[in-house]
Structure formats: C-alpha cells, structure tokens
Amino acid sequence: MDLTKGQSPRRFRAQSEEACLDAPLRAVLDHATRHFRAKRGAALEAFADCEAHFARARSARLRSLSRLPELLEELEHNAAAAGTQVHWAADAAEARALVAGIAQGCGARVVVKGKSMVTEEIELNPALEAAGIEVWETDLGEFIVQLAGEPPSHIIAPAIHKSRAEVARLFREKLGLVCQDGGESIPELTLLARRALREKFLQAEMGVTGVNIAVAATGSLVLVENEGNIRMSTTCPPVHVAVMSLEKVAASLEDAADLLRVLPQSATGQRMSSYVSVLTGPRRRDEADGPREAHLVLLDNGRSRVLADPVLREILLCFRCGACLNVCPVYQTGAAMPTAPCTPGPWARCCPPCCCRRRTPATCPSAAPCAGPASAPAPWA
Amino acid sequence: MRIQLMIPCLVEDCLPEIGLAVVSVLERLGLAVDHPGGQTCCGQMAWKAGDLGNARALALRSLDLFAGPGAVVCPSGSCAKMLRTYPELFPPGTAAHARAVALAGRVFEFCEFLAGLPGAPDFGAGLPARAALHRSCQLDGSEAPARLLGAVRGLTLLEPERPDRCCGFGGQFSLQFPGVSASLLEDKVRELLALDPDLLVSAEPSCLMNIGGGLARLGRPVRALHVAQVLDLGLTGGAAWT
C-alpha cells in the first residue's frame, strides 16, 4: 500500500474506509499481527512469574510519574556530570530547532537515525532536510518506509504494511540495487540494505536516536533494538543526539532492569532484545569508540499537561510495546493506515490532542470499536 | 430466589424476543424475576463517548432502579460490564461511589449467572441443531456460554477458526466508520458460514443484531439467537426454531 498520497486529517474517515477495501494490505496486516500475537503469547506462557514481573514494571513506571519533575532534574544533573549536554524543548518546534542547531554546529551533512517515534512526532527529518542535511533512517523497516516516502505504520514494525515484492521494487527504483540472485528473498534484501547503510554510518557526522529508558540516578540512556543499527548510530558518528519524551525517565538502574525484563517480552516476544545499549556520556579518554559529543533533548510537547490531568495521567505509564496494535481489530483492517499516527493505540485516545495535534486527526482515536481488546495486552491495563 | 432483570436498550427496542426468552428460562428454573420499571440506557454510550456528565446521570438513575436486594441479571456482557464500571464514575469516599461498588458486586451477565446456579450447566434442554458460537469481546473470554450450550442435548457447538475476531459492531464505531465495520463483519460472517451452521448463537445482543444483519443480507437461512433463546427453545420442546 502507498501511504504517500494526500494524507489529511480531514479526509481520514473516507481514506480509512477506502483502505480497508485493500485486500492485499489486509492480508499482510493479518499475517503480521497474527505472528506478533503468537510470539508474545508463547513468550508470556514461558515467562515464570510473568504477572509479578509486570507488576514490578508498573511500579517502576508509577515511581517515575509520581516524582517526574525531580527525577528529570536528577537526570539532567547526572547526565551533565557524565559529559552529556542536556537541552529542554517545550514543544516540537523547539526540539527541531535544537537538533538542527546541533547538526549545523558540528557541520553535519549526513545524519543517521535509529528508529524513534518521538522524532516522528516532532517531524524532525523534514526539518533537517530543509537545512540541507541528508538524513538516513537505519532501522530496516524505517529505511524501507523512508525510501517509499511514507510514515511508519507500526511502532515496532514500521514497514509492516510492505510486502517483500514492494521492498525489492523500492530498492531497485530508489537505490538501483538488486539481489545477487535476482530474487526477493528477505536475507538477500537485508544484505542490500546493510551494504547501503554501512556507507552512511561511516559518512555521518551525527547520529540521532530516541530513548527507551533514561536512568535518573546515573544519567544513562537505555536503548533497545534488534538490528545493531542504533549501536552503530550512537557510536560511529562523532556526535550523538538522543531525543527523549519526558516520561521515559526511570529512577534507578533497578527500575530500568524491571522495565527491560518485560518490554521485549511484550513487544516482540523475546526474552531480551538482541542489543541493549546503556550510554552514559560521550567517549572517555581511555575509550576506543563512542561519540565525541553527546546531547540529550528532553521533549515536553504537551506531556506535562497530560501529567497534570488526573484522568489522562495514566496513559504516561505506557512504555510503547505496541502489543495493543496487534490485537486491535481495526488496525488489522488497514483502516488506521492513512494516518499512521505517531501515537497509535490507546495513546491516541489521550495524547494526540495534547501532543501532536497536526499529525493525528481528531476522529482517529474513535476508530477503535471498543476498549476491551485494545487494552487487554497492555501489561498493566 | 428473586432476581432483578436489567434489559439493555437494544433488547428493549430491537430484539425484545431475547428479553422474553430470558424471563422464560429464569422462571422455568424456579427464579422469581422482577423487572424494575423506568429502565433507560445504562450510560455506556455516553461513557465511551467521553461524556462523563451524562454517564454519571444515567448511572445514578440505575443505582436507584436497582437499589433493591439480590442479583441484577442482564442478557448483555457489554451492559453488565458498564454496571460494573460505575465505581470509576464517582470519586471514592462519596455515597454514590459506595452504592456503585455495592451494585457492581451484584451484577451478573445472564450466562455467568446461569452457570453459577445449582445443576448448571445441564438444565435438561435439548435442541437438534448445528450452532456456531460467537464469543463476543464484551464477555471478556467467559466460558459460560459455551458451557451452557455444550450441555444442550442434540446441539452441535461449532467454533470459528478465529474466535477472537471482532464482529465490527462496537457501538458508536459502526455508525462513525460504517465501511470499516462492514469489512470486519464480512470476515466474521465468512468464517462463521464456513462452519455450515443452522444457528448463530451469542450472548451479546449487539453482535447478534450486527452478524444477523450480515447473514440476512447474504440471504443465508441462518437464524441469529441469544443463548437465552436457545435454552428457552431447548426447554420448551425445541422444534419451533425451524
């Protein structure tokens, strides 16, 4: 499916009704979400004391929210002590200007990015490109949707709506690359992407990522991934910029560990993701790699208003595993595709009105038939 | 035992035969059924639309209506769930909250209530038919409908390949996004018809209305019945459904 054409919040209803008539799209989404559900189900089945671990993770999130302002100050203090430059952004425009400013300050012409929903929220890529900077998404799924000129369609699997045939065509048309055997096998296509991206990692003057968890007590940033591209983005280029939404702070390494124990299980059905990076400041004198400069941009963009609201506050407990999408009957019809909101799922019911007005149409949150199945997979729903 | 019957608006206005079957079954099992007069919407539509004011007003009305003692039985998982949600509508510590908590503890979806009665799940019903079960999401995975139907003599209970599939109704959703709703229904109906059933059975009136409509538009001779209607037919001789 092509998500590039005329996306408009006002036309969401008509477009979503049209999207669900796209039989191949529905088949792809049905297959992919079924696969995710099965993996998660099997993982939780084998996860001893699953409920106790989810309860611990929930407690960790509650501890964060109950002391959010002071934990953020502690994070700022400890990150700065480790050598990270900390910036505060009240809204998307401020965050874009900050990141673009850092890029210009280090003379960046090429920027590599790790998968990050928060940079989707602030629409960072167009801002960097407007400043004459080449931006490369390095997560395979993000790379695919970037080549297609589309937004990600799932917070864990951004190219969930693309078939391998479409990916092969994109690589051929946009990059002039074809598989050695002329086919469309996933391993061969992945190799093509890897070769193209390796060059970009080596050229880039700056890497931009999101943050899964920030540890207030140590000033560390925790990043979770399976492809190694985030580790490359945070270690190859001389400058690393992490953009973080405020609520991602955790009080301690122990709290971060409690969250890490359940996040991959719930997101991808893995006991642990292939890579977990814990970054504390830029490269030290005795270290062989890592960036020369490390920046952390703390983004509010409406979240302090959500926090102040006794009813909406709870949504900030969400740690973005994406499991709700995989059980959402409407998501599986493809009806949500024309918007590909940066905050889908139950988030969309509460946060977009506060955080990203422009990207998410007002009617989108109501495009879910009932709260039952959508909330069921959330670890603490 | 005396119980209070809560009738959902959809049953009152569109599918009254479900209400009649519920009363018939409950009375046949020796229960005295009260139907408090003046029932309105339980407030679910307002609650799901984010209209807390009207949801509270309707909840207070239900709290008054069902203030009497004993179980409140409702032939809809969705409305029963709303009645159990009332405590969320009022601040803890208030009188309304305390009354809401007390009511929530006495509310039963029809099948859950029956499955907890002495002699359950076999009440002696018999109905020779192939019945496809739709497990509504509003029943939160309850096994009670399948247990009750499984005990009906002569009834072959059929389950679709993907019992978790939504029928696409979802209250206001089907009005706001009719095309998306219809595409969900299409998948659901296709899967159910593959079972070659005589009956479609569910414990959720809204799903029955939606799926029943889908079947009727396809011109398939498959009747959509509530579990209560199946039991009623099964207890009263049975052949009348054809």
Image (cartoon, grey):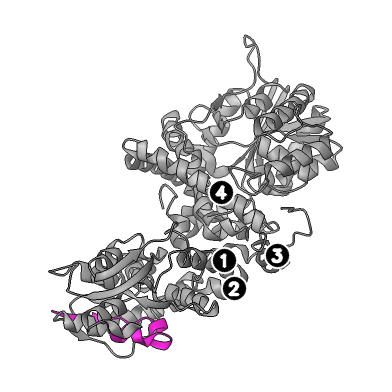
Determine contact: label 4, label 3, CB under 8 Å.
no
**Residues indicated by labels 1 and 2 sit on the same polypeptide chain:** no
Q: Earlier in the sequence, mark 4 or mark 1?
A: 4
Q: Chain of mark 3?
A: A
Q: CA distance from mark 3 to mark 1?
A: 15 Å
* Closer to the eye: label 1 or 2: 2
Q: CA distance from mark 1 to mark 2?
A: 8 Å
Q: Could one spot residue B43 in this view of the protein?
A: no
The image quadrant that residue A235 belongs to is top right
- Label 1 belongs to which residue? A366
- Label 2 belongs to which residue? B176
* Closer to the eye: label 2 or 4: 4
**Residue A31, labelled with which disc?**
4
Q: Which amino acid lies under the numbered mark 1 shown in the image of this protein?
A: Ser
Q: Chain of mark 4?
A: A
Q: Chain of mark 2?
A: B
SS category of the residue bearing label 4: helix
Q: Which amino acid lies under the numbered mark 2 shown in the image of this protein?
A: Gln
SS category of the residue bearing label 2: helix
* Extent of the magenta region: B1-21
Q: CA distance from mark 4 to mark 1?
A: 24 Å
Q: Earlier in the sequence, mark 3 or mark 1?
A: 3
Q: Earlier in the sequence, mark 4 or mark 3?
A: 3
Question: Callout 2: few (<14), some (14-19), or many (20+) C-alpha neighbours within 10 Å?
Answer: some
Query: Would you say residue B172 sits in the magenta stretch?
Result: no
Question: Callout 3: few (<14), some (14-19), or many (20+) C-alpha neighbours within 10 Å?
Answer: some
The image quadrant that residue A138 belongs to is top right
- Label 3 belongs to which residue? A15
In percent of width and height, residue B139 lies at 36, 65
